[in-house]
Amino acid sequence: MTPFLAASLAATVATLAAAVLLRGAAYAAFVGVLLAIHSAVLLGLQQVWEPLLPLAVWLQLATLIHLLMLIHARLRPTWYRAVVSIPAHFWMAGTFLAAPWAIAAALGLPPYGWWLPYLAALIGVGQSLRSRPEVVDLVLDGEHHPELRRLHARRHRGGGPTTGTERPLRLVQITDPHLGPFMSEERLRGICARAVAEEPDLVLLTGDFFTMEGRGSSDSLARALAPLQALSGRTFACLGNHDLEAPRAVAEGLAAAGIRLLVDDFASVQTDAGPVQIIGLNHVWRKRAERYAPVFARTPDPGDALRIVLLHDPSGFVHLPFGEADLVLSGHTHGGHVGLVSLGLDWTSIGGIIGMPDHGFWGRGPDRMYIHRANGHYGFPLRVGVPSEESVLRVHLKS
Protein backbone atom coordinates (compact mmCIF):
# COMPACT_ATOMS: atom_id res chain seq x y z
CA MET A 1 0.00 0.00 0.00
CA THR A 2 1.36 3.42 -0.96
CA PRO A 3 1.95 6.11 1.70
CA PHE A 4 -0.77 8.23 0.09
CA LEU A 5 -3.36 5.48 0.41
CA ALA A 6 -2.28 4.58 3.95
CA ALA A 7 -2.61 8.21 5.06
CA SER A 8 -5.92 8.47 3.25
CA LEU A 9 -7.32 5.41 5.03
CA ALA A 10 -6.17 6.74 8.41
CA ALA A 11 -7.87 10.08 7.71
CA THR A 12 -11.00 8.21 6.59
CA VAL A 13 -11.19 6.37 9.92
CA ALA A 14 -10.77 9.68 11.76
CA THR A 15 -13.55 11.23 9.67
CA LEU A 16 -15.89 8.33 10.51
CA ALA A 17 -15.08 8.63 14.20
CA ALA A 18 -15.86 12.35 14.14
CA ALA A 19 -19.12 11.67 12.31
CA VAL A 20 -20.20 9.16 14.97
CA LEU A 21 -19.27 11.37 17.91
CA LEU A 22 -20.49 14.72 16.59
CA ARG A 23 -23.48 13.91 14.38
CA GLY A 24 -24.68 10.38 15.00
CA ALA A 25 -24.90 6.87 13.61
CA ALA A 26 -27.10 7.66 10.59
CA TYR A 27 -24.70 10.21 9.14
CA ALA A 28 -21.71 8.03 10.03
CA ALA A 29 -23.29 5.11 8.15
CA PHE A 30 -23.81 7.31 5.08
CA VAL A 31 -20.19 8.50 5.19
CA GLY A 32 -18.94 4.99 5.86
CA VAL A 33 -20.60 3.46 2.80
CA LEU A 34 -19.50 6.36 0.62
CA LEU A 35 -15.88 6.23 1.73
CA ALA A 36 -15.73 2.43 1.61
CA ILE A 37 -16.55 2.45 -2.10
CA HIS A 38 -14.28 5.44 -2.67
CA SER A 39 -11.32 3.84 -0.87
CA ALA A 40 -11.77 0.49 -2.62
CA VAL A 41 -11.55 2.12 -6.07
CA LEU A 42 -8.53 4.21 -5.05
CA LEU A 43 -6.85 1.03 -3.80
CA GLY A 44 -7.36 -0.58 -7.20
CA LEU A 45 -5.93 2.46 -8.98
CA GLN A 46 -3.21 3.35 -6.48
CA GLN A 47 -0.35 3.00 -8.97
CA VAL A 48 -2.09 5.28 -11.43
CA TRP A 49 -2.15 8.17 -8.99
CA GLU A 50 1.49 7.97 -7.89
CA PRO A 51 2.75 10.34 -10.66
CA LEU A 52 -0.08 12.77 -9.81
CA LEU A 53 0.36 12.66 -6.06
CA PRO A 54 -0.01 16.40 -5.25
CA LEU A 55 -3.31 16.53 -7.15
CA ALA A 56 -4.58 13.35 -5.51
CA VAL A 57 -3.63 14.61 -2.04
CA TRP A 58 -5.54 17.88 -2.55
CA LEU A 59 -8.63 16.15 -3.91
CA GLN A 60 -8.69 13.53 -1.16
CA LEU A 61 -8.16 16.20 1.49
CA ALA A 62 -10.99 18.28 0.00
CA THR A 63 -13.27 15.25 0.13
CA LEU A 64 -12.60 14.53 3.79
CA ILE A 65 -12.92 18.21 4.77
CA HIS A 66 -16.22 18.42 2.89
CA LEU A 67 -17.62 15.41 4.74
CA LEU A 68 -16.34 16.67 8.08
CA MET A 69 -17.88 20.11 7.58
CA LEU A 70 -21.25 18.50 6.86
CA ILE A 71 -21.33 17.57 10.53
CA HIS A 72 -22.29 21.21 11.09
CA ALA A 73 -24.09 21.81 7.82
CA ARG A 74 -24.75 25.25 6.37
CA LEU A 75 -24.36 27.00 3.04
CA ARG A 76 -20.74 27.89 2.39
CA PRO A 77 -19.19 30.92 0.67
CA THR A 78 -18.07 30.85 -2.95
CA TRP A 79 -14.38 30.41 -2.15
CA TYR A 80 -15.09 27.35 0.00
CA ARG A 81 -17.25 25.74 -2.66
CA ALA A 82 -14.57 26.41 -5.28
CA VAL A 83 -11.67 25.06 -3.20
CA VAL A 84 -13.36 22.27 -1.22
CA SER A 85 -16.93 21.28 -2.11
CA ILE A 86 -16.80 21.19 -5.89
CA PRO A 87 -13.37 19.46 -6.10
CA ALA A 88 -14.65 16.93 -3.56
CA HIS A 89 -17.74 16.18 -5.65
CA PHE A 90 -15.59 15.85 -8.77
CA TRP A 91 -13.25 13.44 -7.00
CA MET A 92 -16.02 11.31 -5.52
CA ALA A 93 -17.96 11.11 -8.81
CA GLY A 94 -14.92 10.38 -10.98
CA THR A 95 -13.67 7.72 -8.58
CA PHE A 96 -17.08 6.04 -8.45
CA LEU A 97 -17.25 5.99 -12.26
CA ALA A 98 -13.71 4.56 -12.34
CA ALA A 99 -14.79 1.38 -10.53
CA PRO A 100 -14.58 -0.83 -13.68
CA TRP A 101 -10.98 0.30 -14.22
CA ALA A 102 -10.14 -0.46 -10.58
CA ILE A 103 -11.59 -3.95 -10.97
CA ALA A 104 -9.51 -4.47 -14.13
CA ALA A 105 -6.36 -3.34 -12.30
CA ALA A 106 -7.13 -5.67 -9.38
CA LEU A 107 -7.36 -8.55 -11.87
CA GLY A 108 -3.92 -7.69 -13.20
CA LEU A 109 -5.15 -6.02 -16.39
CA PRO A 110 -3.74 -2.65 -17.49
CA PRO A 111 -6.33 0.06 -16.66
CA TYR A 112 -6.12 1.68 -20.08
CA GLY A 113 -8.17 4.86 -20.30
CA TRP A 114 -8.50 5.17 -16.51
CA TRP A 115 -8.69 8.93 -16.98
CA LEU A 116 -11.93 8.76 -18.99
CA PRO A 117 -14.28 8.68 -15.96
CA TYR A 118 -12.45 11.66 -14.48
CA LEU A 119 -12.79 13.54 -17.77
CA ALA A 120 -16.52 12.75 -17.71
CA ALA A 121 -16.68 14.04 -14.13
CA LEU A 122 -14.87 17.23 -15.12
CA ILE A 123 -17.43 17.82 -17.86
CA GLY A 124 -20.08 17.04 -15.27
CA VAL A 125 -18.84 19.89 -13.07
CA GLY A 126 -19.75 22.31 -15.86
CA GLN A 127 -23.13 20.67 -16.40
CA SER A 128 -23.83 20.83 -12.67
CA LEU A 129 -23.04 24.54 -12.41
CA ARG A 130 -24.99 25.98 -15.30
CA SER A 131 -28.02 25.46 -17.51
CA ARG A 132 -29.16 26.74 -20.89
CA PRO A 133 -32.65 28.22 -21.17
CA GLU A 134 -35.02 26.40 -23.50
CA VAL A 135 -38.68 26.31 -24.51
CA VAL A 136 -40.62 23.04 -24.40
CA ASP A 137 -43.90 22.54 -26.28
CA LEU A 138 -46.32 20.04 -24.74
CA VAL A 139 -49.42 19.09 -26.70
CA LEU A 140 -52.33 17.69 -24.69
CA ASP A 141 -53.94 15.83 -27.57
CA GLY A 142 -56.37 13.71 -25.54
CA GLU A 143 -55.21 10.49 -27.21
CA HIS A 144 -55.56 7.33 -25.12
CA HIS A 145 -52.44 5.30 -24.30
CA PRO A 146 -53.32 2.04 -22.55
CA GLU A 147 -49.88 1.78 -20.95
CA LEU A 148 -47.36 4.29 -19.66
CA ARG A 149 -45.22 5.47 -22.56
CA ARG A 150 -42.83 8.25 -23.53
CA LEU A 151 -44.28 10.96 -25.76
CA HIS A 152 -42.62 13.56 -27.94
CA ALA A 153 -42.04 17.09 -26.67
CA ARG A 154 -40.55 19.73 -28.95
CA ARG A 155 -37.60 21.63 -27.49
CA HIS A 156 -36.22 24.94 -28.73
CA ARG A 157 -33.21 26.95 -27.69
CA GLY A 158 -35.03 30.11 -28.73
CA GLY A 159 -38.72 30.91 -28.64
CA GLY A 160 -39.55 28.57 -31.53
CA PRO A 161 -42.80 28.50 -33.49
CA THR A 162 -46.09 28.02 -31.70
CA THR A 163 -48.43 25.12 -32.31
CA GLY A 164 -51.98 25.82 -33.48
CA THR A 165 -53.91 29.06 -33.25
CA GLU A 166 -54.80 29.08 -29.56
CA ARG A 167 -52.57 30.90 -27.11
CA PRO A 168 -50.67 28.26 -25.12
CA LEU A 169 -50.50 28.28 -21.35
CA ARG A 170 -46.98 29.40 -20.44
CA LEU A 171 -45.50 27.79 -17.35
CA VAL A 172 -42.16 27.90 -15.61
CA GLN A 173 -41.48 24.87 -13.44
CA ILE A 174 -38.80 25.12 -10.75
CA THR A 175 -37.94 21.83 -9.13
CA ASP A 176 -35.23 20.26 -7.00
CA PRO A 177 -33.03 23.34 -6.65
CA HIS A 178 -31.36 21.67 -3.66
CA LEU A 179 -29.60 24.67 -2.16
CA GLY A 180 -26.05 23.50 -1.55
CA PRO A 181 -22.64 23.24 -3.22
CA PHE A 182 -23.94 23.52 -6.80
CA MET A 183 -26.97 25.71 -6.11
CA SER A 184 -26.02 28.83 -4.25
CA GLU A 185 -28.53 31.34 -3.00
CA GLU A 186 -27.39 33.68 -5.77
CA ARG A 187 -27.82 31.10 -8.52
CA LEU A 188 -31.36 30.21 -7.46
CA ARG A 189 -32.24 33.89 -7.20
CA GLY A 190 -31.04 34.30 -10.80
CA ILE A 191 -33.21 31.39 -11.94
CA CYS A 192 -36.22 32.99 -10.26
CA ALA A 193 -35.46 36.40 -11.76
CA ARG A 194 -35.25 34.92 -15.26
CA ALA A 195 -38.53 33.11 -14.63
CA VAL A 196 -40.21 36.41 -13.80
CA ALA A 197 -38.70 38.02 -16.92
CA GLU A 198 -40.40 35.37 -19.08
CA GLU A 199 -43.79 36.73 -17.91
CA PRO A 200 -45.32 33.25 -17.53
CA ASP A 201 -48.93 32.60 -16.65
CA LEU A 202 -47.83 30.49 -13.69
CA VAL A 203 -44.66 29.48 -11.85
CA LEU A 204 -45.02 26.02 -10.31
CA LEU A 205 -42.49 24.62 -7.87
CA THR A 206 -42.37 20.88 -7.30
CA GLY A 207 -40.26 20.41 -4.21
CA ASP A 208 -36.86 19.55 -2.75
CA PHE A 209 -35.56 23.01 -1.95
CA PHE A 210 -32.75 22.13 0.45
CA THR A 211 -29.82 19.76 0.76
CA MET A 212 -28.05 18.81 3.95
CA GLU A 213 -26.04 22.04 3.64
CA GLY A 214 -29.06 24.20 2.85
CA ARG A 215 -31.02 23.10 5.92
CA GLY A 216 -28.31 24.72 8.00
CA SER A 217 -29.14 28.11 6.45
CA SER A 218 -32.93 28.06 6.41
CA ASP A 219 -33.39 31.80 5.76
CA SER A 220 -31.58 31.41 2.44
CA LEU A 221 -34.66 29.97 0.72
CA ALA A 222 -36.72 33.12 1.25
CA ARG A 223 -33.91 35.29 -0.10
CA ALA A 224 -33.33 33.02 -3.11
CA LEU A 225 -37.02 32.91 -4.07
CA ALA A 226 -37.60 36.62 -3.46
CA PRO A 227 -37.90 37.60 -7.18
CA LEU A 228 -41.07 35.49 -7.40
CA GLN A 229 -42.85 38.01 -5.19
CA ALA A 230 -43.46 39.93 -8.42
CA LEU A 231 -45.80 37.10 -9.53
CA SER A 232 -47.79 36.83 -6.33
CA GLY A 233 -51.04 34.94 -6.94
CA ARG A 234 -49.47 33.04 -9.81
CA THR A 235 -46.96 30.91 -7.91
CA PHE A 236 -47.78 27.55 -6.31
CA ALA A 237 -45.73 24.73 -4.82
CA CYS A 238 -45.89 21.18 -3.49
CA LEU A 239 -43.52 19.36 -1.15
CA GLY A 240 -40.76 16.92 -2.07
CA ASN A 241 -39.25 14.14 0.00
CA HIS A 242 -36.38 16.28 1.31
CA ASP A 243 -38.83 19.00 2.33
CA LEU A 244 -40.31 16.62 4.89
CA GLU A 245 -36.97 16.84 6.71
CA ALA A 246 -37.36 20.61 7.23
CA PRO A 247 -41.07 21.36 6.66
CA ARG A 248 -41.17 24.56 8.71
CA ALA A 249 -38.17 26.13 6.98
CA VAL A 250 -39.63 25.27 3.57
CA ALA A 251 -43.10 26.59 4.40
CA GLU A 252 -41.70 29.84 5.81
CA GLY A 253 -39.40 30.37 2.82
CA LEU A 254 -42.20 29.83 0.33
CA ALA A 255 -44.60 32.08 2.23
CA ALA A 256 -42.03 34.88 2.40
CA ALA A 257 -41.80 34.80 -1.40
CA GLY A 258 -45.59 34.89 -1.81
CA ILE A 259 -45.77 31.28 -3.00
CA ARG A 260 -48.84 29.27 -2.02
CA LEU A 261 -47.96 25.82 -0.74
CA LEU A 262 -50.52 23.15 -1.64
CA VAL A 263 -50.37 20.07 0.60
CA ASP A 264 -53.11 17.71 -0.60
CA ASP A 265 -54.99 20.86 -1.50
CA PHE A 266 -56.10 22.74 -4.60
CA ALA A 267 -56.31 26.27 -5.98
CA SER A 268 -58.10 27.80 -8.95
CA VAL A 269 -56.63 30.65 -10.96
CA GLN A 270 -57.66 32.57 -14.05
CA THR A 271 -54.88 33.07 -16.62
CA ASP A 272 -54.71 34.78 -19.99
CA ALA A 273 -54.82 31.30 -21.51
CA GLY A 274 -57.96 30.32 -19.57
CA PRO A 275 -58.87 28.90 -16.16
CA VAL A 276 -56.52 26.48 -14.42
CA GLN A 277 -57.09 24.25 -11.42
CA ILE A 278 -53.92 23.25 -9.55
CA ILE A 279 -53.71 20.30 -7.15
CA GLY A 280 -50.62 19.94 -4.98
CA LEU A 281 -50.01 16.46 -3.57
CA ASN A 282 -47.97 15.76 -0.48
CA HIS A 283 -45.01 13.42 -0.87
CA VAL A 284 -45.67 9.87 0.34
CA TRP A 285 -43.77 6.63 -0.20
CA ARG A 286 -46.47 4.06 0.62
CA LYS A 287 -50.14 3.44 -0.15
CA ARG A 288 -50.06 6.22 -2.68
CA ALA A 289 -53.26 5.32 -4.49
CA GLU A 290 -55.11 5.29 -1.17
CA ARG A 291 -53.60 8.65 -0.19
CA TYR A 292 -54.20 10.36 -3.55
CA ALA A 293 -57.78 9.24 -4.15
CA PRO A 294 -59.40 11.25 -1.31
CA VAL A 295 -57.65 14.42 -2.47
CA PHE A 296 -59.24 14.15 -5.91
CA ALA A 297 -62.57 13.10 -4.40
CA ARG A 298 -62.87 16.30 -2.37
CA THR A 299 -61.56 18.58 -5.12
CA PRO A 300 -64.35 20.20 -7.19
CA ASP A 301 -64.75 19.16 -10.80
CA PRO A 302 -62.56 21.52 -12.83
CA GLY A 303 -65.20 22.03 -15.52
CA ASP A 304 -63.57 23.82 -18.45
CA ALA A 305 -60.42 24.53 -16.45
CA LEU A 306 -57.17 22.75 -17.21
CA ARG A 307 -56.21 20.59 -14.25
CA ILE A 308 -52.50 20.58 -13.36
CA VAL A 309 -51.23 18.26 -10.64
CA LEU A 310 -48.00 18.99 -8.77
CA LEU A 311 -46.46 15.63 -7.85
CA HIS A 312 -42.83 15.61 -6.81
CA ASP A 313 -42.09 11.92 -7.46
CA PRO A 314 -43.00 10.77 -11.00
CA SER A 315 -43.30 7.14 -9.90
CA GLY A 316 -46.56 8.18 -8.25
CA PHE A 317 -48.12 9.04 -11.63
CA VAL A 318 -49.48 5.53 -12.20
CA HIS A 319 -51.15 5.64 -8.78
CA LEU A 320 -53.26 8.70 -9.59
CA PRO A 321 -56.98 8.19 -10.25
CA PHE A 322 -57.30 7.36 -13.94
CA GLY A 323 -58.35 10.27 -16.16
CA GLU A 324 -58.09 12.92 -13.41
CA ALA A 325 -54.91 14.77 -14.44
CA ASP A 326 -54.66 16.80 -17.65
CA LEU A 327 -51.00 17.48 -16.88
CA VAL A 328 -48.81 16.30 -14.00
CA LEU A 329 -45.58 18.16 -13.27
CA SER A 330 -42.86 16.16 -11.52
CA GLY A 331 -39.16 16.30 -10.68
CA HIS A 332 -37.30 14.19 -8.08
CA THR A 333 -35.13 12.15 -10.48
CA HIS A 334 -32.92 15.04 -11.62
CA GLY A 335 -33.29 13.74 -15.15
CA GLY A 336 -31.38 10.56 -14.39
CA HIS A 337 -28.09 12.18 -13.26
CA VAL A 338 -25.85 10.12 -15.56
CA GLY A 339 -26.80 9.47 -19.17
CA LEU A 340 -26.65 10.45 -22.81
CA VAL A 341 -29.16 13.29 -22.84
CA SER A 342 -26.41 15.77 -23.80
CA LEU A 343 -25.94 13.74 -27.00
CA GLY A 344 -29.62 14.00 -27.89
CA LEU A 345 -30.49 10.50 -26.62
CA ASP A 346 -33.04 9.58 -23.94
CA TRP A 347 -30.92 6.92 -22.18
CA THR A 348 -30.05 7.58 -18.53
CA SER A 349 -28.84 5.43 -15.67
CA ILE A 350 -32.19 5.57 -13.88
CA GLY A 351 -34.41 5.05 -16.89
CA GLY A 352 -32.11 2.59 -18.63
CA ILE A 353 -31.24 0.41 -15.65
CA ILE A 354 -34.24 0.73 -13.32
CA GLY A 355 -36.85 1.42 -16.01
CA MET A 356 -38.33 4.37 -14.12
CA PRO A 357 -39.52 7.43 -16.08
CA ASP A 358 -37.01 10.10 -15.14
CA HIS A 359 -37.30 12.93 -17.69
CA GLY A 360 -39.45 14.19 -20.52
CA PHE A 361 -43.09 13.86 -21.55
CA TRP A 362 -45.16 10.77 -20.69
CA GLY A 363 -48.71 9.54 -21.13
CA ARG A 364 -51.00 6.97 -19.53
CA GLY A 365 -54.56 6.80 -20.74
CA PRO A 366 -55.68 10.41 -21.30
CA ASP A 367 -53.36 11.71 -18.56
CA ARG A 368 -50.03 13.38 -19.26
CA MET A 369 -46.91 13.97 -17.17
CA TYR A 370 -43.86 16.14 -17.70
CA ILE A 371 -40.74 15.27 -15.70
CA HIS A 372 -38.40 18.24 -15.40
CA ARG A 373 -34.66 17.42 -15.34
CA ALA A 374 -34.42 19.70 -12.27
CA ASN A 375 -32.64 22.98 -11.70
CA GLY A 376 -30.22 21.42 -9.23
CA HIS A 377 -29.30 17.96 -8.03
CA TYR A 378 -28.43 15.92 -4.96
CA GLY A 379 -27.32 12.38 -4.22
CA PHE A 380 -24.87 11.33 -6.92
CA PRO A 381 -22.10 13.96 -6.74
CA LEU A 382 -22.44 15.35 -10.29
CA ARG A 383 -24.57 15.45 -13.38
CA VAL A 384 -22.78 13.63 -16.18
CA GLY A 385 -24.38 13.79 -19.62
CA VAL A 386 -27.70 14.98 -18.18
CA PRO A 387 -27.74 18.80 -18.02
CA SER A 388 -29.93 20.68 -15.59
CA GLU A 389 -33.07 22.26 -17.00
CA GLU A 390 -34.28 25.84 -17.07
CA SER A 391 -37.28 25.94 -19.36
CA VAL A 392 -40.53 27.62 -20.27
CA LEU A 393 -43.30 25.06 -20.85
CA ARG A 394 -45.86 25.98 -23.50
CA VAL A 395 -48.95 23.82 -22.98
CA HIS A 396 -51.14 23.44 -26.06
CA LEU A 397 -54.63 22.00 -26.13
CA LYS A 398 -55.36 20.18 -29.36
CA SER A 399 -58.44 21.72 -30.96
Image: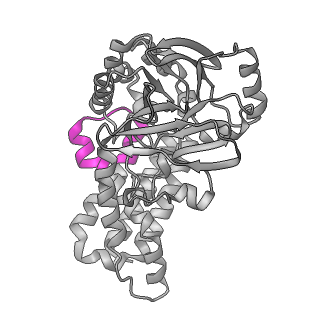
Measured as percent of width and height from the top left, residue 249 is found at 47, 20
Q: Residue at x 43, y 77 (%)?
A: 101
Q: Is residue 357 visible?
A: no
Q: Residue at x 37, y 41 (%)?
A: 69
In depth, the one of 250 and 135 nearer the eye is 135
80 magenta-colored: yes
Q: Quadrant of the N terminus?
A: bottom left
In depth, the one of 161 and 137 nearer the eye is 161
Q: How is the model colour-coded?
A: one colour
Q: Does 107 sit above or below residue 246?
A: below
Measured as percent of width and height from the top left, residue 47 is found at 33, 80
Q: Does 177 sit above or below residue 223?
A: below
Kindly indicate the quadrant of the structure image that contains residue 197. top left
The majority secondary structure of the magenta stretch comes to helix
Q: Quadrant of the C terminus?
A: top right
Q: Is residue 355 visible?
A: yes
11 magenta-colored: no
Q: Does 235 sit above or below residue 314?
A: above
Kindly indicate the quadrant of the structure image that contains residue 321. top right
In depth, the one of 193 and 3 nearer the eye is 193
Q: Does 3 sit above or below residue 296?
A: below
Question: Could you tell whether 146 is left or right of 59 in the image?
Answer: right
Measured as percent of width and height from the top left, residue 198 is found at 31, 25
Question: Could you tell whether 244 is left or right of 164 in the image?
Answer: right
Magenta region, residue range: 66-86
Measured as percent of width and height from the top left, residue 25 is found at 57, 43
